[in-house]
């Protein structure tokens, strides 16, 4: 159990700069999720922590120890790989025991730890099987078991749920979260799935092009996105972005319509509205939009419409049953309008108003 | 054409020389040179009895075994780590370098090779023969195992690293068990090639270290050739590799689909 600290970390593959310069501290016992689109450097960062990729420049500390020059074996970390990477020629028991054997743990203790982990993950009956004879979900558990028995300083997860079907993914997701609360070990989890990030993390690190966009608790990332990228990446369906001119508290859309958002700023901006923050306007006050597509999800309904030529989505209550072609007056929930700088994409400080 | 007919034709083409060799070894000296060749003849063991009585056949066999066995062992000891290193560093040049020794015809090297060993005082020793044959076994081992190692998902080797293995231990405990069929194939091919390698053995061996292939050559005389004896010797020489191949047939077949199956 230990913190992980990166200082001025840089990573280049030949001429390609994957991580330009990165500072981050992951606290002891913290569950941190690296999230971002493919190629954002999240997996590279995890592999750097694991010691599977050398550091080009900068320092990496696990606990108080600088580990730049330590091999993966010397770092006392455990990793769950995307394809699980179980040893095909070993039984489940041997797979889990292997790391302890390599560290010369006494056989009795190995047995106790493996049995304990097997109980924890409910894979006791599988111990004598080989990976070939396991389902995807079972292999995933064995991969976690192999990490758990080691009782490492840091757990690393490299998109471990991406090869599972949707239902199993949800189940394992909650299991990993429960496990993290039980084990109280520092965990770093990489995913491109913002739902996994939101549901599991103590803190989320949003990455793009090897640069940290924002670090914060899930509600902070969702509620106060630092820039347009984070706002668009977190939340499903994505936030709607509309270029606007702010004038006297109202946002004037390009097509001349306006939305009252009570902004104090004036000038050009990008207005961001999450689908779930559209509300049907009570009287004629809202912005009437023409419905182009309706997707009923049961719990709520997604309404697609166009503002100019920009596709937008609103999430409304299921009892609002709009028809395609119907004009639906929409307003923005109080205090839920986000404003971004049209050039830099940075969130404008007065973007969220009471 | 049916598949079976095709197989029969191919098999006949491949097997004919072997059948000819074996059948000739059981022919009397009159039958063996008969023209047109006889296919129906009275089998005799006289070639084999003469071979075993007039030549120290078993001491030649022992020489062959020592030389091929040792050179195969050296090929494995050097080739397995070399192939693994080439695979994990994704570099193919070491494999090319080992092959380069086989690119030019051996006759080009023969004289300088002989001079080197003569100056070392090693001509006629097991050492000279074993080292020479290791130059044959090494590239075989590397070239058979390199694609086998390449087929192992990198994450499995990385997992071994995270689990506490250094390079040698992940080779021994994780990579090698996963390429076991490739290892068997490499061993057999190396052994067979070394067993049958003639040219350098002819030059570098003496009466005490002469392997079977060279000894069998003695049956081809200047004036007359003892074809029956030669065929009997050839049949006996071919026997160990054949037995070996049949014994590990299961792995050989599995090896053909190497890499197709992931754990």
Image: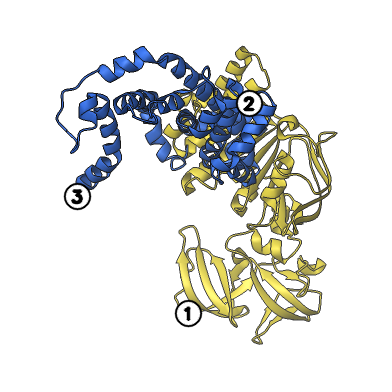
Chain colours: A yellow, B blue
Is A161 in front, or is A267? A161
Identified at 23% across, 45% down, the residue is B9
Q: Could you tell me residue A292's position as x and y percent?
A: 49, 77
- Mark 2 and mark 1, same subunit? yes
Q: Disc number at residue A326?
A: 1
**Residue sitting farthest toward the front:** B223
Secondary structure beneath label 3: loop
Q: Disc 2 sits on a residue from what chain? A: A
> Is A162 above or below relative to B221?
below
Disc 2 versus disc 1: distance between alpha carbons? 63 Å
Is B115 in front, or is A185? B115
Identified at 60% across, 48% down, the residue is A196
Residue A197 shown left or right of residue B148 in the figure: right
The residue that label 3 is drawn on is B2
Is residue B164 at all visible to an observer of this figure?
Answer: no
- Mark 1 and mark 3, same subunit? no
Q: Quadrant of the N terminus of chain A?
A: top right
């Amino acid at each position: 159990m230990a913190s992980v600290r990166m200082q001025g970390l840089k990573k280049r593959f030949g001429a390609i700069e994957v991580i330009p310069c990165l500072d981050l501290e992951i606290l002891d016992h913290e569950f941190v999720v690296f999230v971002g689109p493919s190629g954002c450097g999240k997996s590279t960062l995890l592999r750097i922590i694991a010691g599977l990729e050398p550091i080009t420049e900068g320092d990496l500390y696990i606990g108080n120890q600088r580990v730049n020059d330590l091999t993966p074996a010397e770092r006392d970390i455990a990793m769950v790989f995307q394809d699980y990477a179980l040893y095909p020629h070993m039984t489940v028991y041997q797979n889990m025991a292997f790391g302890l054997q390599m560290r010369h743990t006494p056989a009795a203790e190995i047995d106790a730890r493996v049995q304990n982990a097997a109980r924890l993950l409910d894979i006791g009956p599988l111990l004598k099987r080989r990976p070939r004879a396991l389902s995807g979900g079972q292999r995933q558990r064995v991969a976690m078991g192999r990490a758990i028995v080691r009782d490492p300083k840091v757990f690393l997860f490299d998109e471990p749920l991406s090869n599972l079907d949707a239902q199993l993914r949800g189940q394992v997701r909650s299991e990993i979260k429960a496990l993290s609360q039980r084990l109280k070990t520092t965990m770093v989890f990489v995913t491109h799935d913002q739902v996994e990030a939101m549901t599991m993390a103590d803190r989320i690190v949003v990455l793009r092009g090897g640069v940290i966009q924002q670090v914060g608790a899930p509600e902070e990332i969702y509620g106060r996105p630092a820039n347009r990228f984070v706002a668009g990446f977190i939340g499903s369906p994505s936030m709607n972005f509309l270029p606007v001119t702010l004038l006297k508290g109202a946002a004037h859309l390009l097509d001349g319509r306006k939305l009252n958002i009570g902004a104090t700023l004036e000038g050009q901006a990008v207005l961001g509205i999450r689908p779930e923050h559209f509300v049907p306007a009570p009287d004629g006050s809202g912005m009437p939009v023409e419905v182009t597509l309706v997707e009923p999800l049961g719990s709520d309904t997604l309404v697609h419409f166009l503002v100019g030529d920009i596709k937008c989505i609103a999430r409304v209550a299921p009892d609002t049953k709009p028809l395609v072609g119907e004009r639906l007056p929409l307003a923005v929930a109080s205090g839920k309008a986000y404003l971004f700088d049209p050039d830099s994409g940075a969130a404008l400080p007065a973007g969220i108003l009471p | 054409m049916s598949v079976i007919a095709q197989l029969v034709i191919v098999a006949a083409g491949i097997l004919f020389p072997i059948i000819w060799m074996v059948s000739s070894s059981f022919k009397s000296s009159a039958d063996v040179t008969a023209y047109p060749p006889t296919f129906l003849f009275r089998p005799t063991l006289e070639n084999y009895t003469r071979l075993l009585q007039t030549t120290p056949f078993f001491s030649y066999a022992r020489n062959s075994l020592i030389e091929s066995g040792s050179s195969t062992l050296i090929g494995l000891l050097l080739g397995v780590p070399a192939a693994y290193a080439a695979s994990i560093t994704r570099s193919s040049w070491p494999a090319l370098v080992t092959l380069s020794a086989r690119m030019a015809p051996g006759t080009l090297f023969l004289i300088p090779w002989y001079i080197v060993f003569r100056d070392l005082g090693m001509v006629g020793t097991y050492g000279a023969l074993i080292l020479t044959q290791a130059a044959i076994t090494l590239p075989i081992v590397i070239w058979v195992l390199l694609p086998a190692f390449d087929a192992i998902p990198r994450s499995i080797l990385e997992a071994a690293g995270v689990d506490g293995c250094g390079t040698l231990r992940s080779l021994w405990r994780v990579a090698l068990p996963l390429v076991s069929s490739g290892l068997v194939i490499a061993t057999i091919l190396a052994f067979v090639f070394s067993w049958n390698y003639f040219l350098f053995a002819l030059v570098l061996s003496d009466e005490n270290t002469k392997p079977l292939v060279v000894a069998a050559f003695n049956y081809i005389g200047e004036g007359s050739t003892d074809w029956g004896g030669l065929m009997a010797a050839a049949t006996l020489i071919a026997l160990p590799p054949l037995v070996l191949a049949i014994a590990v047939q299961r792995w050989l077949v599995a090896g053909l689909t190497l890499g197709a199956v992931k754990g």
